[in-house]
Amino acid sequence: MTQQPWLKNYAPGVDWHAELPRKPLYTLLDDAVAHYGQHNLVDFMDRHFTYAEIGALADRAARGFQDLGVGKGVKVGLFLPNCPQYIAAYFGILKAGGTVVNFSPLYSEEQLLHQIEDSDTDFMVTLNLELLYPKMATMLRESRLRKLIVGTMQEALPFPKNWLFPLFRRGDIATVPNDADHLSFQQLLNNDGDFTPVEIDPDSDIAVLQYTGGTTGVSKGAMLSHGSAYANTQQITLCLPDYVPGTERMLGVLPFFHVFAMTVVMNFSINIGAEIIIHPRFDLEAVMKDIPKKRPTLMPGVPTMFVAITGHPKATETDMSSLRACMTGGAPLPVEVKQRFEQMTGAKLFEGYGLTETSAVSTANPLNGLNKPGSIGLPVPGTDIVIVDRDDATKIMPQGEPGEICVRGPQVMMGYYKRQDATTDTMIDDMLRTGDVGYMDEDGYTFIIDRTKDLILAGGFNVYPRHVEEAIYEHPAVEEVTVIGIPDDYRGQSVKAFVKLKQPEELDQAKLLKFLGPKLGKAEMPTEIEFRDELPKTMIGKLSKKELVAEEQAKYEARKAAG
């Protein structure tokens, strides 16, 4: 067993040694229905669904899926935005004994085809929207898919939005054939909900096949067992001991198809009997209206969302006092963003850390207790963080020394689906190698220096983009920044920064470099700074480097070809 310096710094009421039961994941909903049946689970565009209503929909979905042949080993895809149908279908699949496979609505047809074939998905649930259905119609022809289950937006909307939607949004609605390859969501639910219970082994049965972002190669399916996903939900709950069961309101703007939102927004909310104020996507204007109107108490997000909120023209006039706890993950949280958001709202914005392979969350800064700027916090209950030598994973680094961050805990995946080679490269017994470089201080707080793949080798020096980004964020005119390494014939790589400014701020390269002079070493100083109106982001809104890296590589190759 490794040393556990974090134990002495846990906040009151948080117990690292707490029992973490492993149960079928669908019992989260069953238990919540039993305790909070008449409480609202969903607020979707002002239509409310109680826990009992969503529970009944999930039972009927389970029966409908079983009638289609869904059982153990059968994969059912969800190709949906945030909506009530997602929750009902998710738990219906699990109750039927099947495995949920999440698909991003932002994926290209090539990405969808790869994931459908790689995951062995047989059925797909989607909506009759032009943004979604045509892609799945193509997949029905070109992939192994056997049937599409197609819902509608209006069936989830309140009156009169449900009948106004097809009138005023006609161009957004796709035409769906009435044939044997299609089943409406209402047809799936057209039964008495009397499904056949399936015996689940929480340790060996896959609840969710969650695909990685593919930023370091081909996307891989992380096998998250029922027990792992259930345990991670309990770990998150233990980290927030001040919640009041059955009273919290969760602002659900992160996409459920992403592991962070699936666990921290949906499953955690259900575990504590919270109401989820569902937004189909992050729309800043809609969020700024809903915070004072619906008064959420909790809001997970990614740093760019909190940047957007604090940068809104009416941010200082908007009552955001209902917010108490806002968790961020998916990307480093700049210290300046944290401080600005907390000063503006009075809420606590705390950073957590995790991966697809850890069911979402591995570490978090204490809600009540010491938050160290720039740290991803302490391991969640039952979790060990181990820092190993990057070249020899069997060697544990001395405290304070940087190395590869590894995670050991009940939330770690079973492995990658049909990828034993990748599993062997990533897992050391029951310990997950994250690919992230960081260190742990004497208090047990972990600090990420950077991802191994993002490390810039400039003239023999290791340059960590996050350190450069933190320095640039300190300039008051900067709203967002991404730093990458670009090809350099002399130095191997040099540092380039892409910057988005706050409006109506003005800044040029010379002034920003002068500002950075006392903050960065010579090798860390950007050789180029490019100002842009927008920076590339991933499907959940975190800043993305891969598009910029590809652009710069193409420019470099074009220059070389031109001589």
Image (spheres, rainbow, N blue to C red):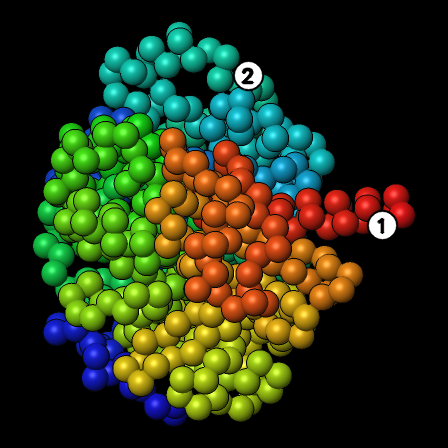
Mark identifier at residue 560: 1
Q: Is 153 drawn above or below residue 13 in the view shown? A: above
Q: Amino acid at mark 2?
A: Thr
Residues packed near mark 1 inside 10 Å, few (<14), some (14 to 19) or many (20 plus):
few
Q: Is residue 558 left or right of residue 75?
A: right
Place residue 425 in its image quadrant.
bottom right
Identify the residue at image location x=24%, y=67%.
371
Residue 400 visible in the snapshot: yes
Find residue 107 and report its horizontal and vertical position in percent. Answer: 58, 40
Please give the count of numbered marks on the rendered protein: 2
Residues packed near mark 2 inside 10 Å, few (<14), some (14 to 19) or many (20 plus):
few
Find residue 76 and report its horizontal and vertical position in percent. Answer: 51, 46
> 378 or 427: which is nearer to us?
378
Place residue 296 in its image quadrant.
top left
Q: SS class of the residue under badge 2? A: loop
Q: SS class of the residue under badge 1? A: helix
Q: Earlier in the sequence, mark 2 or mark 1?
A: 2
Residue highlighted by disc 2: 175
Identify the residue at image location x=55%, y=61%.
525
Q: Amino acid at mark 1?
A: Lys
